[in-house]
Image (tube, rainbow, N blue to C red):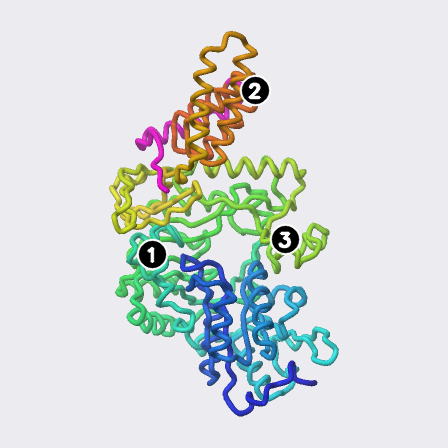
Amino acid sequence: MAPIRSMNPAWKKAPVRILVVVARQTRMASYQLPVGIGYVSASLKRAGFDVMVLNPNHALEDLEVLLERAILDFAPHVIATGGMAFHLKQVREIASISRRLSPHSAIVIGGVLVTNQPEVAMAAIPEADIGVIGEGEETMVELVAAIATGASLDSTRGLIYRDAGSGKLRRTFPRPPHEDLDPLPWIDFDGLGLDVYAGLHRPGEMAPGLIIDPGARVMPFLTSRGCPFACTFCCHEAAGRRYRRRSMDDVFAELEHNIDRFGINTLAIYDDLFCLKRQHLEEFCLRIRPLDLRWQCSIRVEQVNPQSLKLMRESGCTCISFGVESMSPTVLESMQKKTTREAIDQALGQMYESKITVWANLIFGDPAETMNTAMESLDWWQENNRYDLRTAFVGYHPGSRIYDDALRKGLIGDPVSFLLADRAELNGTSMSDDDYAELRAIVQHVLVAFGYCGRILELISTKEGARRMTTICPHCSAENTYLNPGLNKSIVNRISCIYCNQLYRLPVVFRPMQSDELARLADEINALIDTGAEATTDDETKDNANRIYSAAIRALELDKSQEDLWAVAIEASDILGKPAQAIDLLGKAIRAIPFQPLLFDQMQARLIDLGEPGWADRFARQAAHLRSVGILAPAHYS
């Protein structure tokens, strides 16, 4: 077989240069560092190849500017990139720019994106010459050696590539996963830019309970690969179902090597399933305790017990992630979670008592989901909102069973278009699209409206542009002070108590800078209110109310944090005899300002009038919670 591309003769006279490009997720902000590509880079370097890693997440410039600079400076023979399935758009952009700027380089893609759908990935990225299927450490080393010598690729396991003659896609024999992980090189943290990454995270970002001050220095880490369980929505084809773990000696040798080099005080363990056996967990806890790190991990519900939690907490563990997913037995069975509602309840209670934060989701939209099963989860959520679990709709990720089922049923048409849409969700249930849309609205409303909130005593900006926030924890009543908390424009901002480690909502609302148009509309509304007070007929009153409503809605499009604007729009709707419009606006007001007890009181009264005592009780309980914490109105920031 001919080589993939006509090889530049200079390749045979000098070491092959490989540019490894990380998919961009952000620009100088918190994100999940892709350690998989760090293993590949480390393997190439150990094999003697000249490797440069470009991580655009650690720069503010546009991707094309960064790539052009790297290609001009480094003149790579091979450009390698990859990521998760829904990084397709970013990986495709890297490949497209690279082909234009370096037409003679071989472009290689890999990661879960390729592993779970090799032909789809190669079709979606026509600039790619070769795809790496599965774990890429050995495959990339053999591949680059073959490219350097012009050898056939057929003897390199774990590839999909375009035949140079026919252009058709060809696969080589699969490469089995690594049975022994210890011989693998350690993650190339120098290449990935851990010195920058470690300090990008603010309190409230990453895993809850992990970051409590701006001095946190975070290192992601792997102690094992694979997961033996088969949850229907999960895909881990790159690591496989076979669980393999590193020896503790290798784990701690790498940890201790990097802690001092990068000033690490916080550890984010990326394992799909951490320390499957209890004795391994106990050994890890005993060995990590002297290192004085805060750390988090993912385990299964049945691994949770008071003895293990005590050991973990004493060794620095502040957050555990495990799969709650649903509190409907029907959905748990459909997901093949191999757990029960009772076991989940018990594990959550034990974690709460141990002062370790839980990081978990309630996932809606499983194929077995109905409005009744969803309400089982939502009812439980509000009764147990002290855990403040996140909510999401199930993602249909390539490689998962539900994705394959949806593809077979025709729910997913073109796989490439599905991935490029940047939306992994679809209605795979038996519910109508209208009912599914209603469920989405209900879940969003419950998530935003019924959070477990702390009280803000102070939120100020310093002269240097930093923020200082002081709060009262609703769990233990401790006073917390945070510097530069990770506040975002989303109405759901969470943070963990420095003392009891539990998660709670911050009653803060983003307020845009005052605009001339907003001030003009406010003046218009005030003038119309004065005019309405002088109305002498119903028609005049209604005409004026209609004008007030229109102006208020326009103003709310500019700033949804203004409670007075919501109030006049709701009052105008009542005057116009539109109770459904009024209650819809009140619901939107609560979602925009979910920390004002009076709004919940108003919704309770209206729901009672509508004959909805169950929902009325929900709003009454939330109003009582806000008042018990001492929240009468939200804090604002801009």
Q: Quadrant of residue 578 in the image?
A: top right
Q: Residue at x 36, y 49 (%)?
A: 486
Question: Where the N terminus falls, by quadrant?
Answer: bottom right
Where the C terminus falls, by quadrant?
top left
**Could you say whether the residue bearing mark 1 is in a helix, strand or loop?**
strand
Instruction: Report the amino acid beneath label 3.
Output: Ile
198 in relation to 4, above or below: above
Q: Where does residue 242 sit, x and y in percent of width and height?
A: 54, 67
Residue lying farthest to the bottom in this orientation = 13
Magenta-drawn stretch contains 391: no
Quadrant of the image occupied by residue 128 = bottom right
Q: Are marks 2 and 1 in contact (CB under 8 Å)?
A: no
The residues bearing labels 2 and 1 have C-alpha atoms spaced at a distance of 53 Å
Residue 154 visible? The answer is yes
Which residue lies under the disc numbered 2? 578
Between the C-alphas of marks 3 and 2, the distance is 43 Å
Q: Nearer the viewer, mark 2 or mark 1?
A: 2
Mark identifier at residue 317? 1
